[in-house]
Amino acid sequence: MDVQWHIAFCNVTYTEYARTTYRDYYASPAHMLEVQLAAKAIAEARFGVGCFISPHVDGPAAAFASYLGMPVVEPRVDELSYVDTQAPVLRAPADVRRLRWRDPRTAGLMAKRWECWQYYRSRGHDVRLGGHGGSILTTAHELSAGDILLWLVEQPDEAGSVLDAVTDADLALRDLDESLCGPTDAAYTGDDFAGLISPAMFRRFAIPRYERIYGARRDRFMHSELLRAEHLRCARDMLQITCFHGAGCEHLTPAEMHEIMGHAFWVQVTPQQLLEMSPAAIVEIVKRHAHSGAGYLQLYPGRGTPDQNLQAAIAAADRECAGGRVVEYL
């Protein structure tokens, strides 16, 4: 398989390129769209890669937990909104009986996503509502201020009910998205904290909830930064995942991902690497990743990425990745 390459631009780079703050970026749908289009134009003018930025409904990671009732903290400085884990909605597993997800058109940060979706569609942009992402263990960790990890050991049946409730909420959002935007044959789980539990617990607690998310869908994409090789083998064998995104994986090497997934995995040049390494060192890491057996190489610029570093990465990816650019992968 000829490796392909991609650039993951996001709110971090949009706001930097457009010289605005996170607060202003998320303040109104009109400004969000304006910033994304400005960032697209700048990425094209500077690097010839505007194709990697398209208008889309954006939202901070706290949106899903806020939909389930978690209070949100709006920072005074230029930082993203986050949930207040000092005020968890679940203080004991039994509290799940009172957990109710609300109308996403009016609930928490999801209401802003709904407003953005309506605005973008009114401006002719065929975007999805989104908001779901299969973050089952991670969201349960937020809702319980981390206590879910203890409950899985001490009260496993009750803890499983918490995971079921989070899965129900995720699927409810997906059903809403598909009712508005049409069905898709792809499913995604992005659940970093799943790697905090042992492979045996992963099989017992995570796999059954992911099975519900993947269902009978053809494309089964997974990302989780803390998985180890045994977790990934479980996901391959029990869920038949079709692709794994290995960005940020601390306990998995590209060689292990290649052994388990063949070419069906992603490697990434991280924001920290693009910020701190020299252009020559970045070229070398691109070469190494491009010949690691991965099917896909991703560049992920962050705040303060020097232009010369991103230029070096793009040029190296163009040279080393015979499959060329891949713009959409989900």
Image: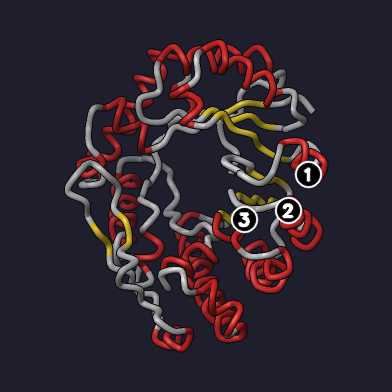
Residue 328 on image: x %, y %: 57, 36
Q: Residue at x 51, y 77 (%)?
A: 165
Q: Is residue 124 left or right of residue 177?
A: left
Amino acid carrying label 2: it is: Leu
What separation in Å lies between label 3 and label 2 (alpha carbons)? 17 Å
Q: Earlier in the sequence, mark 2 or mark 1?
A: 2
Residue situated in front as seen by the camera: 229 or 121? 229
Q: Residue at x 42, y 66 (%)?
A: 142
Q: Earlier in the sequence, mark 3 or mark 2?
A: 3
What separation in Å lies between label 2 and label 1 (alpha carbons)? 9 Å
Residue placed under numbered mark 2 in the picture: 232
Give the label, 2 or 1, closer to the camera: 2
Residue situated in front as seen by the camera: 126 or 259? 259
Residue placed under numbered mark 1 in the picture: 261
What separation in Å lies between label 3 and label 1 (alpha carbons)? 17 Å
Give the label, 3 or 2, closer to the camera: 2
Q: Is residue 213 left or right of residue 58?
A: right
Give the label, 3 or 1, closer to the camera: 1
Amino acid carrying label 3: it is: Ala
Q: Residues within 10 Å of mark 1 (few under 14, many from 20)?
A: many
Residue situated in front as seen by the camera: 216 or 19? 19
Q: Residue at x 63, y 29 (%)?
A: 297
The answer to whether mark 2 and mark 1 are in CB contact below 8 A is yes
Residue 167 on image: x %, y %: 54, 71
